[in-house]
């Protein structure tokens, strides 16, 4: 697996930064910062994240966690 993609898996311990629900989406900012969102908030902030050129990673395995 490529090095850049080794930390894309979200776990039950990862929580949405906005509401505390199980995180399903990881947004990596150009600044190096990182935000976690549930599906709902990922959709809500998607436009803003794209404006910020954030790299959005959806973790398919997190479905069972949420
Ligand atoms: Zn949320």
Image: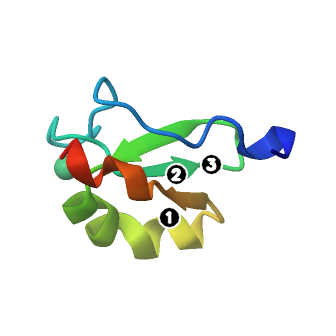
- Residue 6 vertical placement versus 37 (above, below): above
Tell which of 36 and 50 is nearer to you. Answer: 36
- Tag 3: Cα neighbours inside 10 Å, few (<14), some, or many (≥20)? some
Residue placed under numbered mark 2 in the picture: 27
Residue that badge 3 annotates: 29
Residue topped by disc 1:
49
Q: Nearer the viewer, residue 4 or 52?
A: 4
Question: Residue 39: image x %, image y %?
Answer: 26, 61
Q: Nearer the viewer, residue 59 or 50?
A: 59
Q: Position of residue 25 (x, y in %)?
A: 41, 53
User: Which residue shows up at 84% across the image and 38% down it?
Assistant: 3
Examine the image and state in which quarter residue 53 appears.
bottom right
Q: Secondary structure at mark 1?
A: helix
Asked whether mark 3 and ligand 1 are closer than 8 Å, the reply comes as: no
Asked whether disc 1 touches disc 2, contact meaning CB atoms under 8 Å apart, the reply is yes
What is the x, y in percent for residue 62?
A: 33, 48
| 30 to the left or right of 23 | right
**Residue at 43% of width from left, 76% of height from top?**
47
Residues packed near mark 2 inside 10 Å, few (<14), some (14 to 19) or many (20 plus): many
| Dot label at residue 19 | none
Left or right: 27, with 12 as reference point: right
């Amino acid at each position: 697996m490529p090095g850049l993609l080794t930390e894309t898996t979200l776990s039950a311990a990862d929580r949405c930064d906005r509401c505390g629900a199980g995180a399903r989406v990881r947004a990596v900012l150009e600044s190096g910062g990182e935000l976690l969102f549930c599906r709902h908030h990922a959709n809500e902030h998607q436009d803003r994240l794209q404006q910020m050129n954030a790299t959005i990673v959806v973790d398919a395995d997190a479905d069972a966690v949420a």
